[in-house]
Structures are given as C-alpha cells and as structure tokens.
Image (cartoon, helix red, strand yellow):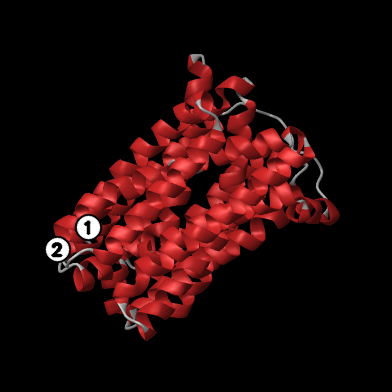
Amino acid sequence: MNRKTTLALLSLAAAYFAMGTTSLLVVAVSAPLAHDLQVSPAAVANLLTIFALTFAVAAPLAQVLFGQLQRRLLLMAGLAVLSVATGLAAFVDGYWQLFALRVAAGAGAALVGPMASAIGAGLVRQEQQGRALALVFSGMMLATVLGVPLAAWLGGWLGWRWVFLIFGAAGLAATVSVAAMVHDRSHGAAVTLPGLLRVLTTRSTGMSVAATLLQMAAQFATYALIVPFVIERMGGTQAWAVAILFAFGVGGLVGNVVAGSMADRLGPDRTIWTSFAGLAVVFALLLAAPPYAWIALALAIPWAVTGTMFQAPQQKRLVGLSPDARGLLLACNASALYVGMAAGSFLAGVAYESLGIAVLPAISLGLMGAAALAFRRSRAESGRRV
C-alpha cells in the first residue's frame, strides 16, 4: 500500500473510532450518568440498546434508500449526524431527551461503519483486503483501548456531560479528516428490498450474518455491565474497572492486528474458529472465577484479543461470498453487529435485575455456542453452493 492509500485507510479508521467511542460512551460513564439522571444501571444499558437497535434497522435500509450514492459523501453525512447528536447530549435535561439523541446518533452511525468498510475494501487489491480492513477496523479497537477508558476517566473528573461534548467534537474532526484524505468517488450498487431479503434468506450469507449477531450478543451480555460486574462480582473498585477497560482495549487492538495477518495467511475460517474457541474459554473462566479483580484484569486481554479476531476475517469472508454486493453484505453484517450489541445489552439488563450479576458470563457462553453453530452452517452452505 502506498502512502496515499495508507492515509485514506487511517482516516477511515478515525471514522470507526468516532463511531465506536460514541456508541460505547454510556458504558464508560454509566455510574455518574445514572446518578445525575436518577435512573438504574439497567436504564443506562437501554441507552446502548436503543443506539444499537437504531443502527441495526437503519444500516440496511440506508443501503436501499441511498446505496447508489457516492460512498464518501454518505460516510461524511453519517459522521456529521452522529457527532452533532452526541455533542447535543451534553445539554439534555432528562433521560428521555438523551434517549432521543441516542436514536439520532445510531441513525448517523448506520452510514459510518458500512461505508468505511466498503471504501476500505475497494482501495486495495484482494490479497491485501484482510490487512486493509483490519487497519480500518482498528479505529473501533482504538475506541476501546483509548476512547472508552479515557471517557471513563473524564467522566469521573469533568462529569459525563463534558464527555459527550468532547467526543462529539472528535467526531467532527474525523469528518474533516475523511473529507481531506479519502478521495474515493465510487458509488454503491442500487439495492432493492427484495435484494436485501435475498441476502438475508440465502443460507450461506444469512447464517454468516447470524453468527456476527450472536458473537456480539455473547460479548455484550457481559461487557454492557462490565463496570458493575467488576465492582459487585469481582470485588473491584471504579479504578479497577477503568484499568480493565483499558486492558480490554489493548487486547482488542492486538487482536485486530493479529486477525488481519491471520485472515490473509491462514484464511478467514480458521481465524474465526480460533476467535470462537478463545471467547468460550474466557467466559467459562469468568463464570467460575473467585471474586478477585485481578482475575478480571488478567482475562480482559485474552477476551479482547480473541473477540476482536472475528471482525476482519468475517468482513473479508463476506466480501468473498459476493464481491459485487459487498456494500449490502457489509451493511447487513454491521447491522447484525449492532443487533447483537442491543440483544446482549438487553439480556444483561434483564439478568441483572432478575438473576444477579454473576450469571452474565453463563449467558455469554450459551450465545457463543449458538454463534459457532450458525457459522458452521454458513460454511456448509457456502461449500455446497460452490
């Protein structure tokens, strides 16, 4: 990859950073936000759920309504909506105003992830797509390694309102970066509702998208309430929770880099199976671990490494299944990612209220088993089709 392409991919990574950080802000500032707005941790988890559900619905519909337009302009429009809605959240008077702005932010984000991935995949040759997509998706990982821990620290120091304002401004900066560095003028293919339904009902692609949904749900069934999990289940403090969020981010960044190389050298399927196996082991250990915060810290890195290893090879695999429809497939995959985030967050909130915090890793473990079954079916169907 030449310098121009690398700068363009880094700008796309900045777009992913803005999307990833703003989507997870409520996780980082859950305690001060709940206290200030006088709501429960489950209500804060619902702010993540509604963002994710909005994204999930809007991402494929945006492909139907706007898919034939220039990808770069759609990306910048999505970033602008996401950033402004996040910044305005700093000025709300109550929970439901924040809830509405999270809907708007989720709608903007629905144009960011799919467009950034589709542009990134088209900037390089096929044999470089694994590494290119890993570089683009590293912005999401940087959101966890830097954005979420920084937001948690700033939330304790400046308050949650300043956190939303600062990261809204960061999103606008990413918009400027894309405008300056990304010169791709390609347009997506026109998408119809029957075409969207065909992608979802074809078993090879539909089951692959289902695997994304279930893998993300498995992670967020525990991660959505990771701060109270660390404090109430593992005997930690807020400082321990910040350290664990930071360790999780470092592991995610490492996993993303490893995934890009593995996907290009070993193939996406083997990389995905490695990710699934690693996550299953981590959730089993979290379920059985004694209540020591250092154990949660030690498991955060392998959790993040193996969890993040999934996305780059999954995107490469989907592009390979239907290169001409990559924009739609990546949008469906991103939609599934956020449906999984919403489902996992919702299950976390329900389990917290009814069964207690300790049961969360068991839910994650069960969802991982379902993800593995869906991916196995997708592989079988894609092989049969060939």
- Label 1, secondary structure: give it: helix
User: How crowded is the residue under tag 1: few (<14 C-alpha within 10 Å), some, or many (20+)?
Assistant: many
* Image location of residue 127, percent across then percent down: 59, 20
C-alpha separation, residue under disc 1 versus residue under disc 2: 7 Å
Q: Quadrant of the C terminus?
A: top right
**Dot 2: few (<14), some (14–19), or many (≥20) neighbours within 10 Å?**
some
Find disc 2 in the rendering and name its residue: 292
Callout 2: SS: loop
Q: Is residue 33 in view from this perspective?
A: yes
Q: Nearer the viewer, residue 202 or 63?
A: 202
Viewer-proximal residue among 328 and 321: 321
Look at label 1 and name its amino acid.
Ala
Does residue 328 show up?
no
Apparent side of residue 203 relative to residue 35 in the rendered image (left or right) = right
Using the image as rendered, state which of residue 365 and residue 76 is in the foreground.
Answer: 365
Labels 1 and 2 touching (C-beta < 8 A): yes
In the image, taking residue 172 as reference, residue 55 lies left or right, namely right
Residue 352, quarter of the rendered image: bottom left
What is the three-letter code of the residue carrying label 2? Tyr
Q: Which quarter of the figure has residue 104?
A: bottom right
Counting from the top left corner in percent of width and height, residue 143 is at 37, 46
Q: In the rendered image, which residue does mark 1 sit on? A: 296
Total marks shown come to 2
The structure residue drawn at horizontal position 17% and vertical position 66%, both measured from the top left corner, is: 290
At 39% from the left and 44% from the top, the residue drawn is 306
Residue 378: x percent and y percent?
66, 48
Q: Residue at x 40, y 54 (%)?
A: 280
From the viewer's perspective, tell me whether residue 254 is left or right of residue 111: left
154 relative to 45 in the view: left or right: left
